[in-house]
Image (cartoon, grey):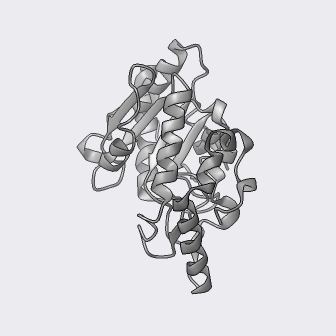
Amino acid sequence: MPNSKAQMHESWLAELGEQFEASYMRKLREFLAAQKRAGKVIFPAGDSMFAAFNSTQFAQVKVVIIGQDPYHGPGQAHGLSFSVPPGVPLPPSLTNIYQEINDDLAADAGTDSVRRSATSGDLTAWANQGVLLLNSVLTVEQSRAGSHQGKGWETFTDAVVAALNAERENIVFLLWGAYAQKKGAIVDESRHCVLRAPHPSPLAAYRGFFGCRHFSQTNSYLQTKGLEPIDWLKPQQQK
């Protein structure tokens, strides 16, 4: 439940602590408590709700990938956008993300694309390198996509984007799809790098996500700023 500040890393609390005292957060807590009393199953589990913020500290953020809301199937959501825990089958959007990574990095290296048989969809390896995997909405009811939209989470995650935009520099924002692009509209492109493309879902990936080459572009930008590039292939190499 979002009434416990202890669930979020102190580096983020220093930026966002006042959000937990706001009226919208009180209403959100009341909504989630009512859902629990009614026997609703909510994903992700309470201790994973703020996983993105505990995996990537505020000062370590180099890249932001914005999703919409958590996966709503059992065992899928664990607090990182687009990611699933080890052993869970890859969702279609993540399969497409992996395809674009392989094509992009192979082209960047001037080699033929090598298809990897990825078995792990756990993107914690990205988060540990400074990729904030941020969903706009941090909870969802089982089997009801979008069920917790408009309950207050969007205000909280707007504050996350605003804090990164104002207090940090040289972050790459990967905005896939109209929803993420609207969410990231406040980002100052004179201080940060913003890359836009269609969503990687099967319905949109062929409209421009494939071929966007965001992963090599991200690393090129980071290197120009003296920052370590992201090892995008690392999750696919996990057993």
**Residue at image x 70%, y 50%?**
8
Residue 186: x and y in percent read 38, 35
Quarter of image, res 227: top right
Q: Is residue 193 left or right of residue 50?
A: left
**Residue at image x 51%, y 29%?**
166
Query: Is 32 placed above or below 230 here?
Result: below
Can residue 111 be seen in the rendering of this structure? Answer: no
Q: Nearer the viewer, residue 93 or 147?
A: 147
Question: Residue lying furthest left in this view?
Answer: 207
Residue 67: x and y in percent read 45, 51
Can residue 215 be seen in the rendering of this structure? Answer: yes
**Residue at image x 53%, y 20%?**
222
**Residue at image x 66%, y 42%?**
12
Q: Nearer the viewer, residue 9 or 26?
A: 26
Residue 195: x and y in percent read 37, 31
Q: Identify the image quadrant of the N terminus.
A: bottom right
Q: Is residue 208 left or right of residue 61?
A: left
Residue 156: x and y in percent read 52, 52
Q: Nearer the viewer, residue 85 or 127?
A: 127
Number of labels in the image equals: 0
Question: Residue lying furthest bottom in this view?
Answer: 38
Quarter of image, res 103: top left
Q: Is residue 102 left or right of residue 20?
A: left
